[in-house]
């Protein structure tokens, strides 16, 4: 099952929307949407990835566009342009998360939606560096451990970004950041819990257990954002 398959559960008409992929990487999400008949615009700061994806899109005659740019300064003059924006495994790598969220808000259409993943600051396993409990340790100590164990370069950290330069967040911290940017947000796991448990008391208990468990053990949070006027 692909990311598109998972997102369609929350946004059934995703493929028919005008889609933007922020930080598209090697382009798996972009190509999946395009193969289903959708149209995608993507931004990616790494030249090699941009050129490879452009070549594939051209060879397959897909209606997609790829721009070499970062999320902080997207090359779209028109506001309110995209009905869905994908920000998957990106926010931790950018320079200024606040600016990226403001840019996403700017180009998101009214009634548009955003999917965003956010690494948990206190998750017990770090999937960038493949280490357990590293996020429970102060960053200046964690950096030394990562270097000592030679985990600075993994398939999930090809640019050798330092742990202390990445933006991991608590759920409360990201919620505050998203609201300041002009979004309301929903946790996809809470959506699933609400759908599964119809009894309000059982549902509330399940959500409380989830919130406590997720604070220390969840690796990533997954949110659907919707635009509100600032």
Image (cartoon, rainbow, N blue to C red):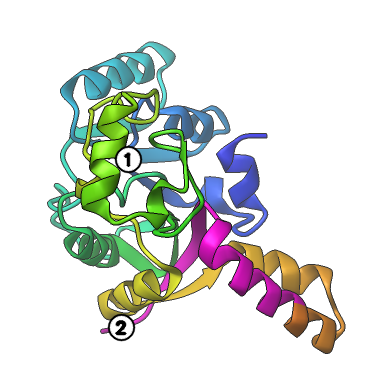
Q: Position of residue 109 (x, y in %)?
A: 35, 66
**Segment colored magenta:** 206-230
Question: Residue 153 lies in what quarter of the image?
Answer: top left
Work out whether residue 182 or residue 108 is closer to the camera in this orientation and state it: 182
Residue drawn at 17 percent across, 51 percent down? 76
Q: Position of residue 80 (x, y in %)?
A: 28, 65
Residue furthest toward the bottom?
A: 201
Which residue is denoted by mark 1 in the rendering? 41
Q: Position of residue 23 (x, y in %)?
A: 30, 40
- Taking the magenta stretch, the answer to whether it contains residue 202 is no
Q: In this orientation, does residue 85 appear?
A: no
Q: Which mark is residue 229?
A: 2
Is residue 45 toward the left or the right of residue 63 in the image? left
Residue drawn at 61 percent across, 35 percent down? 2
Residue drawn at 54 percent across, 34 percent down? 37
102, above or below 47, in the image: below
Q: CA distance from mark 2 to mark 1?
A: 24 Å
Few, some or many C-alpha atoms within 10 Å of disc 1 (few <14, some 14-19, many ≥20)?
some
Q: Which mark is residue 74?
A: none
Q: Secondary structure at mark 1?
A: strand
């Amino acid at each position: 099952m692909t990311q598109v398959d998972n997102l369609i559960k929350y946004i059934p008409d995703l493929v028919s929307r005008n889609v933007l992929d922020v930080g598209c990487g090697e382009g798996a999400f972009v190509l999946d949407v395009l193969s289903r008949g959708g149209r995608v615009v993507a931004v990616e700061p790494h030249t090699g990835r941009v050129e490879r994806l452009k070549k594939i899109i051209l060879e397959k005659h897909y209606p997609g566009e790829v721009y070499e740019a970062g999320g902080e300064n997207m090359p779209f003059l028109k506001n309110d342009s995209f009905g869905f924006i994908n920000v998957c495994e990106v926010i931790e790598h950018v320079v200024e998360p606040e600016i990226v969220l403001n840019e996403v808000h700017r180009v998101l259409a009214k009634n548009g939606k955003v999917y965003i993943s956010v690494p948990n600051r206190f998750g017990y396993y770090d999937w960038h560096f493949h280490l357990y409990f590293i996020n429970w340790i102060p960053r200046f100590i964690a950096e030394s451990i990562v270097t000592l164990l030679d985990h600075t370069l993994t398939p999930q950290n090809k640019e050798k970004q330092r742990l202390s330069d990445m933006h991991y967040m608590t759920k409360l911290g990201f919620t505050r950041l998203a609201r300041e940017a002009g979004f309301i947000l929903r946790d996809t796991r809470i959506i699933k819990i609400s759908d599964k448990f119809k009894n309000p008391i059982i549902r509330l208990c399940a959500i409380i257990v989830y919130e406590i468990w997720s604070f220390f053990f969840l690796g990533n949070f997954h949110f659907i954002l919707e635009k509100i006027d600032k």
